[in-house]
Image: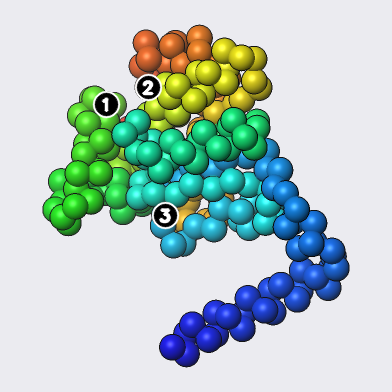
Amino acid sequence: MQKIIELLEANKQWAESLKAEDPTFFERLSEAQNPEILWIGCSDSRITPTSSVGLLPGEMFVHRNVANLVNHSDMNCLAVMQFAIEVLKVRHVIVCGHYGCGGVKAAFDDSRYGLVDNWLRHIQDTMHKHREEIDRQGDYEAQLDKLCEINVIEQIVSVGETTIVQDAWERGQELYIHGWIYRIAEGIYRDLGVTVSSLEQIGAMRDTTFDRRVETRPAGSRPA
C-alpha cells in the first residue's frame, strides 16, 4: 500500500507544479480536449508517449497495446480511432514501435506465453511475409530490429485500410499517418520516412516492396 500512497502524493506534487506555472491549466483542460495527434504505440512501461515528445495533457490522444498492433477485429483500437478522427478531428496518426519490443521478439522466437500468443500471431504473419528481407539483415539483433520496423509499416497500412480512415479521406478530411520507432537505450524517436495521406498512397504501399518503402541498411548493420 505504501507504493500507492507514494503515487498519490507524487500526483499532488505534479499537479501543484503545473498550477504554479499556469494557475488555470486544469480548469481550461477540464472544458475540452483538442489534440491534433492520435498515438498508436506499444504498452511497454518504459515508454511515456506524451511527455517524451514534450506535450502536455490534452495535446495527444493515446492508444497502446502489446506490440502496437492495429487489428481490424480489435474494437478497442477501432473505437479509439473513430473517436479521435471523427469527433476530435486529429490531423496526424503516429504509429510508433520500438526496438527490442518484447511482443515482436516473442513472435520472432516463436515463444509461448499463453493467450497473448494469439495476439502476436499477426506479427508472425508479417515475419513470414517479409522473411527474405529479414534474413538479409545478418545477425539475430539486426533481424529483430528489422522486424520491429516492418511491423510499424504494416500497421500504417492497417490504419489506412480501416473504413474510419478511408471515410475521412473520402470526405476531404486532412489526415496523415506516420511511422516512428523508438530506441529505449537512447530515448530517441526515429521517423521511418513513411507518411501517407490518401487512399492512393495506401494502395501503392500494398504493391511496393518493403525495400522501396524504407531505406534499408547493409546486412548486419544496426539502425542509427
x, y percentage for residue 82? 52, 33
Q: What residue type is labelled 3?
A: Ser
Q: What residue type is labelled 2?
A: Phe
- Residue 164: mark in rendering: none
- Residue 43: mark in rendering: 3
37 relative to 49, above or below:
above
Residue underneath mark 2: 210
Q: Number of labelled discs?
A: 3
Distance from Cα at disc 3 to Cα at disc 1: 24 Å
Q: In which quarter of the image is residue 19?
A: bottom right
Q: Is mark 2 on a helix, strand or loop?
A: helix
Front residue of 73 and 138: 73
Distance from Cα at disc 3 to Cα at disc 2: 25 Å
Q: Quick check: 136 left or right of 183?
A: left
Indicate which label's residue lies in the foreground, 3 or 1: 3
Q: What residue type is labelled 1?
A: His
Whether residue 171 appears in this view of the structure is: yes
